[in-house]
Image (spheres, rainbow, N blue to C red):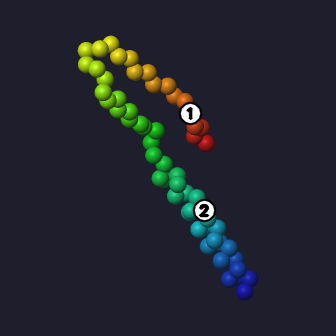
Amino acid sequence: MKKMRKIFAVLLTLAMVLAMSIPTFAAQPNTATITVDKLTPNDNTTVSIYQVVKFNDA
């Protein structure tokens, strides 16, 4: 019975470690695209982009 409990504990630990590693491989690269429509042609239009939120890669 002790051996069965230890085997079950090892399998449960392995399942937890593998479950935590799945989101790591699913992470998307830090790329984004922005499309600005309906700007007037031949007009001096300025489009400014600001970074509002920054996340730490921890």
Q: Say whether disc 2 or disc 1 marks the residue closer to the N-terminus.
A: 2
Q: Residue at x 59, y 38 (%)?
A: 56
Quadrant that contains the C terminus: top right
Q: Residue at x 60, y 62 (%)?
A: 17
How many numbered circles does the render carry? 2
Q: Residue at x 30, y 27 (%)?
A: 38
Q: Is residue 51 above or below residue 32?
A: above
Disc number placed over residue 53 in the picture, else none:
1
Q: Quadrant of residue 5?
A: bottom right
Which residue matches tag 2?
17
Left or right of 33? Residue 4 is right
Quadrant that contains the N terminus: bottom right
Quick one: 35 or 20, which is closer to the camera? 35
Instruction: Tell me the element at label 2.
Output: helix
Q: Is residue 14 above or below residue 37?
A: below
Extreme residue in the left direction? 42
Q: Are marks 2 and 1 in contact (CB under 8 Å)?
A: no
Q: Is residue 14 above or below residue 33?
A: below
Percent across and percent down for residue 2 are 74, 83
Percent across and percent down for residue 41 are 25, 19
Percent across and percent down for residue 29 are 45, 42
* Amino acid on which the number 2 mark rests in the picture: Val
Extreme residue in the top direction? 44
Quick one: 37 or 48, which is closer to the camera? 37
How many neighbours does mark 1 have within 10 angstroms: few (below 14), some (14-19), or many (20 or more)? few
How many neighbours does mark 2 have within 10 angstroms: few (below 14), some (14-19), or many (20 or more)? few
